[in-house]
Each structure stands twice: as C-alpha cells, then as structure tokens.
Image (cartoon, helix red, strand yellow):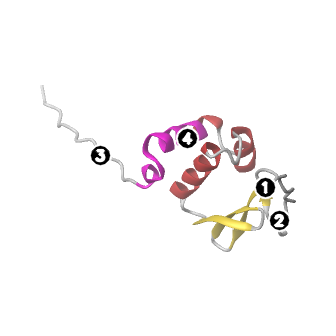
Amino acid sequence: MPQLQLPIFSEGVHLITANLGYQREGDEIVYLHGMMPVFLHRCDDLASFKMIVSQFYINGNARQSELVRAFAIQPLALKRWVKKYREGGPKAFFESRRKRRSTPKKSP
C-alpha cells in the first residue's frame, strides 16, 4: 500500500503544487520536492529556468496552469519551451543561436 507523504516545506517556500515548490536563497533559486532540493540556478539564469520549468511539465510534476500561475509566465511561452525541450532536450536551452549571414544589398 502506498505511503502518504505529507508536503512539508520550510518558511519562505513558494508552492507550485502540493509537493513542488521553490525558494530564493541569496542570488539563487532552489526547487524543492518536499524538503529535497531537486535543482538550483542563479536568479539571472533564464536558460536554466526555462529548462527546469519545461522539465517539470514534461515529467508530469506540474500542470501548465500551475506553472503559469506560480511564475506569472504566458502559456504560449511555456508551450514554446516545452516544444524546444522535446525536440532538443535540456542542451537546447544552452546552445548558442546560429547567426544568419546577411548579404549586402546591391545598389541600383
């Protein structure tokens, strides 16, 4: 028989779901499942934020509505991040973009 796990979070944790939350510690964000830290990134690391939020959605840890509400992000943005994650995995968020070569305009 499965054991009931009570959601126990320390003070200052913002809940995403009943079992998943995040907390700011200095200049870092720590994501917690119960009391267990599962991921950490700097506050200014947008690529890591997009990656972990997408991963929470894909793994079934949180629904789209829960993530949108918890982080005040646009649903369409989350859908784009999830698509990027599914197509390229976590590394897709950390690869540099290819720059297009512009061709010089010919003068008339």
Q: Which residues are magenta?
A: 78-94
List the residue tagged with mark 1. Answer: 19
Label 4 to label 2: alpha-carbon separation: 27 Å
Q: What residue do we see at 78% from left, 50% from top?
A: 17
Disc 3 packing (10 Å; few <14; some 14–19; many ≥20): few
- Secondary structure of the residue carrying numbered label 2: loop
Q: Residue 67, percent across and down?
A: 70, 45
Circle 4: residue type: Val
Res. 103 image quadrant: top left
Disc 1 packing (10 Å; few <14; some 14–19; many ≥20): some
Q: What residue do we see at 64% from left, 49% from top?
A: 56
List the residue tagged with mark 4. Answer: 82
User: Foreground mark, 4 or 3?
Assistant: 4
Label 2 to label 1: alpha-carbon separation: 9 Å
Quarter of the rendering occupied by the C terminus: top left
Circle 1: residue type: Asn
Circle 2: residue type: Phe
Looking at marks 4 and 3 on the same chain, the residue that comes earlier in the sequence is marked by 4
List the residue tagged with mark 2. Answer: 9
Circle 3: residue type: Lys
User: Foreground mark, 2 or 3?
Assistant: 2
Looking at marks 3 and 1 on the same chain, the residue that comes earlier in the sequence is marked by 1
List the residue tagged with mark 3. Answer: 99
Looking at marks 4 and 2 on the same chain, the residue that comes earlier in the sequence is marked by 2
Label 4 to label 3: alpha-carbon separation: 23 Å
Label 2 to label 3: alpha-carbon separation: 44 Å
Q: Is residue 91 magenta?
A: yes
Q: Is residue 6 magenta?
A: no
Res. 15 image quadrant: bottom right
Q: Residue furthest top?
A: 108
